[in-house]
Image (cartoon, rainbow, N blue to C red):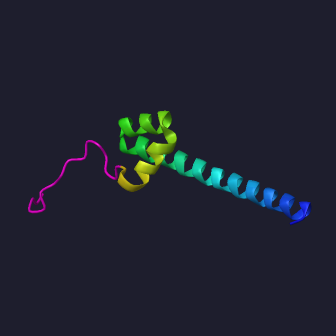
Amino acid sequence: MGSKSGGALTVIGGLLVFIGGILVLIAWIGALIKTAKLGRWGWFVCLIIFSGITLLIYIFWGPTTPKNQIAQDPSYKN
């Protein structure tokens, strides 16, 4: 391979890393906003302190309901 193709691959690789970084940043900010809205402050703090590994865990096993949501009996009628 010539030096031109190596330089082009470096630029393409750098661009892909940059785009990937932007997407991770957007996902991280979205996770912070969602955990704050749900009132899951433990997850929120962990996302700030251990951002990378906690974000991966959050994607698969993160909270989906507010912390203080009361489960309602389906047979209960108002």
Name the foreground residue: 49 vs 30.
49
Residue 28 in sight from this viewpoint: yes
Magenta stretch containing residue 75, yes or no?
yes
Q: How many marks?
A: 0
Characterize the magenta stretch by its predominant secondary structure: loop
Q: On the rendered image, what quadrant is the C terminus found in?
A: bottom left
Residue at the image point whose x is 48% and y is 33% from the top:
49
Residue at the image point whose x is 43% and y is 36% from the top:
46
Image height check: is 59 above or below 75? Answer: above
Question: Quick one: which residue is furthest to the front in this view?
Answer: 1
When asked about the image quadrant of residue 60, the answer is bottom left
Q: Position of residue 57 (x, y in %)?
A: 41, 49
Relative to 48, is 21 on the left or the right? right
Name the foreground residue: 22 vs 34.
22
Q: Position of residue 14 (x, y in %)?
A: 75, 54
Q: Position of residue 25 (x, y in %)?
A: 59, 47
Q: Which residues are magenta?
A: 63-78
Residue at the image point whose x is 80% and y is 56% from the top:
10
Name the foreground residue: 28 vs 54.
54
Relative to 25, is 49 on the left or the right? left
Q: Position of residue 40 (x, y in %)?
A: 36, 40
